[in-house]
Image (tube, grey):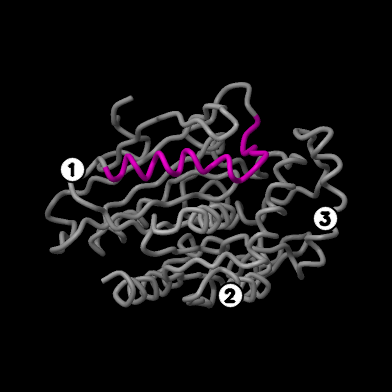
């Protein structure tokens, strides 16, 4: 399938494709690219530089500001809506579902190949960026594909459960038997729309979201999906040994209550950021952790002054590690 005009409007194109995993199943994914006017993009001398962004669970790519930032740093920007998410949703398939995080590997590898081919001959230095569950997926893929990326940027990656590894192990004990017998069984967990409330222009945020692609209460949590998350986090806890420079961006604080709290407008209302910050040290040899006051779960969806701070920190890191 050829590149087509994307839902984000001028400057954005998308291309649907299929990739077969190790299990032989072909899954649909969608690659999005930003094609800014030549005058607005920095084109430094030397090898091509590109970045591939992976969204979080029950999410899709929509942040045009993020694309423009990377273009301003001299990177070609690409994002992927992974299978069962966003632009890649298929009728009759469970939204957000994956039974093994390794099932994303084939579509990520295919997307990396498409990026390499999109700019003609010559090598491309690739940065991989992931948010939340996409950050966990990105870290695991980078560890399984040494040499494929030059930098890894993680925006509030879901590297560990709330509290500690003990919580993860306890959850595994309860979820794994269900996942084996009824992988697509929906788990009855509390539904909270607090984070969506803080970002969606349909509520109290500033971002126009497609509720079909990013539902206010997220997709139903299924047993095998949660089991896959727990298994991925266990691998991170054992250490991934990623050799390339890694940046982890996090809010300075979390607010994970069961009722709305005004602090949720300036904290991570999804993850335990202190636990994530500690677990980040298991990723690799060169890890930078940036804690950002007032940031939301996606630090680049925070209020304007906070995300300006986040972009400034990311730009500084890029100058140091990707120049």
Q: Which residue is mark 1?
A: 120
Give the main secondary structure, helix, strand or loop, of the magenta stretch. Answer: helix
Earlier residue among tags 3 and 2: 3
Give the residue drawn at x 59%, y 53%: 133
Image quadrant assignment for residue 195: bottom right
Give the residue drawn at x 34%, y 55%: 51
Q: Which mark is residue 171?
A: 3
Coordinates of residue 308 in the picture (x, y in percent): 38, 71
Give the residue drawn at x 31%, y 44%: 115
Earlier residue among tags 1 and 2: 1
Q: Nearer the viewer, residue 84 or 60?
A: 84
Q: CA distance from mark 1 to mark 2?
A: 37 Å
Coordinates of residue 315 in the picture (x, y in percent): 33, 72
Helix, strand or loop status at disc 2: helix
Image quadrant assignment for residue 169: bottom right
Q: Please name which of the two marks, 1 or 3, marks the residue nearer to the observer.
A: 1
- Does the magenta run of residues contain 24? no
Q: Please name which of the two marks, 3 or 2, marks the residue nearer to the observer.
A: 2
């Amino acid at each position: 399938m050829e590149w087509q005009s994307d839902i984000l409007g001028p400057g954005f194109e998308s291309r649907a494709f299929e990739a077969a995993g190790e299990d032989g199943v072909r899954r649909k994914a969608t690659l999005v690219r930003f094609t800014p006017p030549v005058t607005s993009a920095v084109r430094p001398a030397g090898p091509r530089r590109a970045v591939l962004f992976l969204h979080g669970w029950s999410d899709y790519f929509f942040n045009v500001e993020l694309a423009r930032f990377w273009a301003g740093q001299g990177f070609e920007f690409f994002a992927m809506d992974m299978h069962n998410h966003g632009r890649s949703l298929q009728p009759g398939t469970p939204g957000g579902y994956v039974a093994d995080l390794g099932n994303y590997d084939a579509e990520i590898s295919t997307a990396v190949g498409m990026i390499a081919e999109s700019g003609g001959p010559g090598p491309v230095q690739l940065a991989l960026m992931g948010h939340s569950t996409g950050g966990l997926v990105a870290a695991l893929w980078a560890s399984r594909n040494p040499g494929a990326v030059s930098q890894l940027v993680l925006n509030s990656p879901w590297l560990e459960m709330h509290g500690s590894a003990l919580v993860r192990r306890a959850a595994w004990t309860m979820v794994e038997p269900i996942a084996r017998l009824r992988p697509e069984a929906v788990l009855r967990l509390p539904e909270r729309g607090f984070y969506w409330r803080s970002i969606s222009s349909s509520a109290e945020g500033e971002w126009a979201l497609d509720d079909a692609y990013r539902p206010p209460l997220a997709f139903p949590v299924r047993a095998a999906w949660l089991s896959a998350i727990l298994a991925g986090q266990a691998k991170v806890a054992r250490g991934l040994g990623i050799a390339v420079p890694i940046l982890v961006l996090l809010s300075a604080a979390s607010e994970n209550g069961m009722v709305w709290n005004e602090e949720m407008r300036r904290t991570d209302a999804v993850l335990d950021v202190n636990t994530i910050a500690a677990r980040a040290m298991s990723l690799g040899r060169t890890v930078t952790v940036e804690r950002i006051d007032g940031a939301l779960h996606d630090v680049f969806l925070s209020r304007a002054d906070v995300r300006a701070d986040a972009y400034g920190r990311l730009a500084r890191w890029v100058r140091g590690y990707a120049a």
